[in-house]
Image (cartoon, rainbow, N blue to C red):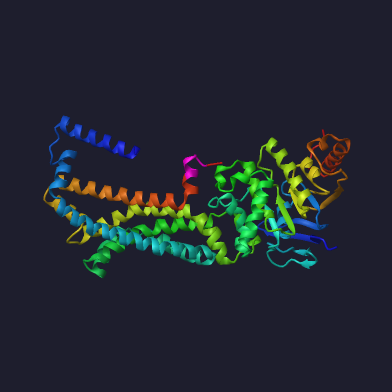
Amino acid sequence: MTAALTLSHVTKTYLTKTGPLTALDDLDFEIAEGEFLSVLGPSGCGKSTLLTLASGLEAPTDGTVLRAGQPVRRAVTDIGIVFQTDALLEWRRVLENIMLQPQIRGLDMAAYERRARELLDLVGLGDFAGKYPHELSGGMRQRVSICRALVHDPSLVLMDEPFGALDALTREQMVMELHQLWLRTKKSVMFVTHDIQEAILLAGRVLVMTPRPGRVAEIVEVDLPYPRTPRTMETPRFIALVAHVRNLFEQYGVLKKY
Amino acid sequence: MDGLLVSMALLLVWEAAVRIGQVPAYLLPPPSAVATRLVADFHGILLHTLTTAGEILLGFGLAIVVSIPMAALLAQSRSAERVLHPILVLSQTVPKVAVAPLLVVWFGFGLTPKILIAFTMCFFPIVVDTLTGFKSAPAQLRWLALSTGATRWQAFVHFQVPAALPHIFSGVKVASTLAIVGAVVGEFVAADRGLGYQLIVANGALDVTLSFTILVVLSVMGVLLYGLVDVIERLVLPWHVSQRAHGGGR
């Protein structure tokens, strides 16, 4: 089976006024079809660069990025992106924001409207289809943004710290909702975060990155049973995994030892 | 509604101040005298008002029709903007009041120079605000547009234009007040009709009451034009206007 995303020996160097800056160094991993991979790293470790490479906005300086076995050469359209700022279009109502995808792609609007409404129901926003984004809370906005990333059934979903701007309680709930959504849809997901627990709770594997230049510190297998719940975080195995990642971060100087 | 109340209060204060201070009418006529004059000279003032209103609307409309597409084009190309932006700024630093006599030399005493002066006054704020609007779309939106496979035209229509509209409207609002200044300046320089012309004549005859009457008519026109733009904004951008009403939404 071909992987949803493959990075082989990918290096990305930016030319800046103060000289070349290596954002990513020899990154080598793949996301299997239907896999949920968390990318966990400190700020400035090149996580955003990783997303621009995966979506084909930029080309790697070295190495190759493959989507479904094909090298990525231009902006990839078979993806859904969820940003930290939900990036909803303020001038479109909730349903219209989701329908942006089929509209621009020239797909069958009626069929996709059914699907969009299903997704909205799934995240508990069925009654909000006709609202404008500014009438929603931060958590609701991000749910809409997730629906928009899923409605066109992309083969890969990229998430850039999607819950980073939410309060802790909303965040925990959103993590569980996303998990439920993933269990139902089994999309390939690359979930970028700097939250250790979130990364582990959601993922099949966690790619831990080093501080700049971003390298793979370790890819941690998360052998926790599905479906996961907030209680999963109380299990010894979960705690051990968190401790393991903490050790990695301490080792690389991301977290200070006390 | 609040604006109406405040205007009423100001008129009352004005009337009271003139009466209590016994200010002679040739210095500051009371609003009641202005109102009487407006009724008495209604026909003459109306004709001049129609002339000036025509100049304002044509100059303002021309500015909208030219500035917005121009800003849209500038926003598409960084190099075009780099080349043209300094020229735009330069054109704006030339005082238009000083250019007005030249325009009369070039285009005569008719409607054209007034429209052009109103146009040059309105042009810059609309271009600058529109350009800001087109460039203010966050990077994520561009990224999102690319990920949907949007063509350049689709990205323009579905992302750039709506994101720019609030800025466009604020530029148009500023321009709506300048259009009136432009038309009146044009009439000051050379005209045989229009409120600016009538103002010069009234001042020459020391007819201060008529001068004030014309000023009131000009301000009302300004308020109406601004109000018209505001109403259109409410209709076109319900999402933006209501967001402002809630103090920024979210």
Image quarter hosting the C terminus of chain A = top right
From where the camera sits, is residue A253 visible?
Answer: no
Say left or right for B23 vs B229.
Answer: left
Residue reaching furthest to the left:
B205
From where the camera sits, is residue B240 visible?
Answer: yes
Residue at 82% over, 52% down? A216
Camera-side residue of B13 and A104? A104
Image quarter hosting the N terminus of chain A = bottom right
Residue reaching furthest to the top:
B20
Residue at 60% over, 44% down? A127
Q: How many marks?
A: 0
The image quadrant that residue A199 belongs to is top right
Say left or right for A115 vs B102.
Answer: right
Residue at 22% over, 66% down? B110
Residue A196 at x, y percent in the picture: 78, 42
Residue A68 at x, y percent in the picture: 79, 64
The image quadrant that residue B98 belongs to is bottom left
Residue at 64% over, 55% down? A114
Residue A48 on the magenta span: no
Residue B245 on the magenta span: yes
Residue B37 at x, y percent in the picture: 14, 45
Camera-side residue of A178 and A162? A178
Residue A251 at x, y percent in the picture: 85, 43
Q: Which residues are magenta?
A: B242-248
Q: Is residue A68 above or below residue B5?
A: below
